[in-house]
Image: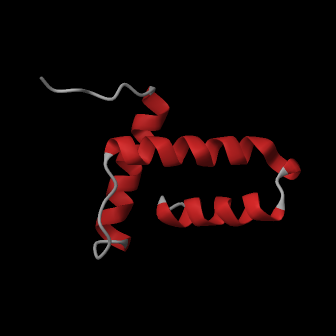
């Protein structure tokens, strides 16, 4: 029995964009699975939503997530 991760269309599009960027910019790094991407993308979206309320630690994590997800 296979388990499929259900994600909204926007997250799926961001995952496909990530895979495409990975081909060009990060071949030497392992590619994230859809499940891994979805978890990190959710964390990134939550931090972005906090806006100016982010503390220094959250700012650092946001930068880290952007780099991992090739969004920097």
Instruction: Give the colouring mode of the picture.
Output: secondary structure
Identify whether 28 is placed above or below 39: below
State which quadrant residue 71 falls in.
bottom right
Q: Where residue 47 sits: x, y (%)?
A: 70, 47
The structure residue drawn at horizontal position 59% and vertical position 66%, both measured from the top left corner, is 64
Q: How many numbered discs?
A: 0
x and y, in percent, of residue 56 in the image? 81, 65
Identify the residue shown where x is 32% and y is 71%: 29
Q: Is residue 72 visible?
A: no
What residue occupies the far bottom of the structure in this picture?
Answer: 28
- Considering the image in quadrants, where does the N terminus appear? top left
- Picture quadrant where residue 15 is located: top left
* Corner quadrant of residue 65: bottom right
Up-down: is 3 above or below 27?
above
Residue 67 is left or right of residue 55, and the answer is left
| The C terminus sits in image quarter | bottom right
Residue 48's place in the image compared with 9, above or below, is below
Estimate the x, y position of residue 43 in percent, counting from the top left: 59, 45
Residue toward you, 17 or 37? 37
**Can residue 35 be seen here?**
yes
Q: Residue furthest left?
A: 1
Asked whether, in this view, residue 58 is left or right of residue 15, the answer is right
């Amino acid at each position: 029995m296979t388990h499929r991760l259900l994600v909204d269309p926007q997250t799926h599009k961001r995952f496909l964009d990530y895979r495409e960027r990975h081909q060009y910019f990060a071949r030497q790094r392992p590619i994230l699975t859809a499940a891994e991407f979805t978890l990190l993308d959710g964390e990134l979206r939550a931090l972005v939503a906090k806006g100016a309320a982010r503390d220094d630690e959250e700012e650092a994590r946001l930068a880290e997530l952007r780099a991992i997800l090739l969004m920097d």
